[in-house]
Amino acid sequence: MLRSIREQPKETPQPAPRQIFQERQRITGLPLYFQGYLSVRHSRCQEFRMYWTELRGTMLFFYDDKKAPTYSQKLDISALISATNVSPDENGSAQFILMLSNGELELKANDCEHGKEWKGFILTVTRLTVPADESLLPGQLGRMHEVLQKEKKRRIMLNNCPSTSSNRKSPPSCSLTTIPACFYAVSRQEAIEMLEKNPSCGNLILRPSSDSKNYAITIRRELEAPHLKHYKVISKGTSYFVELERQVTLPSLQDVVNYFVTQTQGNLKPFVIQTHTAEDPVL
């Protein structure tokens, strides 16, 4: 039985601490588009339950606590049929309903502004178009256009993954079980910032390449001064080609990571976020 809704915080929601955000990024493997408090119920016979909610790709991830590294529930909204208008209730909250192929999901936000923003981002990623809602502010529309471009690029990368081909055996790279722990669905700049701000976590990140079709390795080494470098990893068939002075061919992404580690005699270490326990200080 879902517990009854608690009063939602009135202050502007702040993002989770960086290390928790990065661990969620690693677990989900999806880009974060929007986040905040939402109250949810799957059936009108239930009570609403409040979650810290993240929209990643076309998935909603629900967390019992804003600082929890792992989600308690997730929902695929890629097959969204429609969404009702956002309407206020007697308490000033704003409700709307997502009509999905397998049922309905009722969502409740703090107020109408947040409700329309949530609905706008959901429609943007599921319909691949920014909704024409005159009540949305210019800044909100601008962020939705940015998310639209990111989601289009993400889908291009998915479509180019060999696992989507019906006449080709899926290579290890497209299996979630074989994605290295140091893979993060981040941009080049985000990878640089992660390495610079968390040197104790490692100095090698595997990420999508800028063409959204292949992969890239970003490394940061402490020589006379901090030294950043990026290497493209091309996926072809069931192999990976690393663009070095002499092209290297390897059978899996994990082998790509291992190659960099062994060739530098352990000076390069895969970047893996260590989550804090309840007793650790909050960032």
Image (cartoon, rainbow, N blue to C red):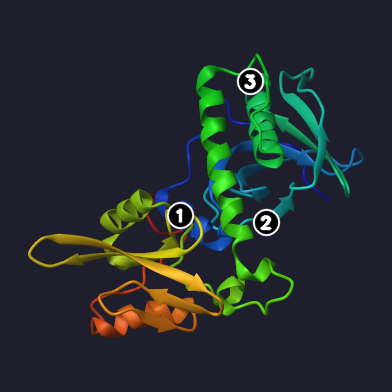
Q: Nearer the viewer, residue 169 or 187?
A: 169
Q: Which residue is mark 1?
A: 211
Q: Earlier in the sequence, mark 2 or mark 1?
A: 2
The residue type indicated by label 3 comes to Glu
Determine whether the residue tagged by mark 2 lies in a helix, strand or loop.
loop
Estimate the x, y position of residue 169 in percent, counting from the top left.
67, 80
- Judged by depth in the image, the label closer to the viewer, 2 or 1, is 1
- Judged by depth in the image, the label closer to the viewer, 1 or 3, is 1
Name the residue rendered at 61%, 74% in the picture: 175
The residue type indicated by label 2 comes to Ser
Q: Which mark is residue 15?
A: none
Name the residue rendered at 28%, 80% in the picture: 246
- Residue 244 horizontal side relative to residue 186, left or right: left
Name above or below for residue 120 compared with residue 180. Answer: above
Q: Nearer the viewer, residue 252 or 105?
A: 252
Q: CA distance from mark 1 to mark 3?
A: 35 Å
Q: Which residue is mark 2?
A: 72
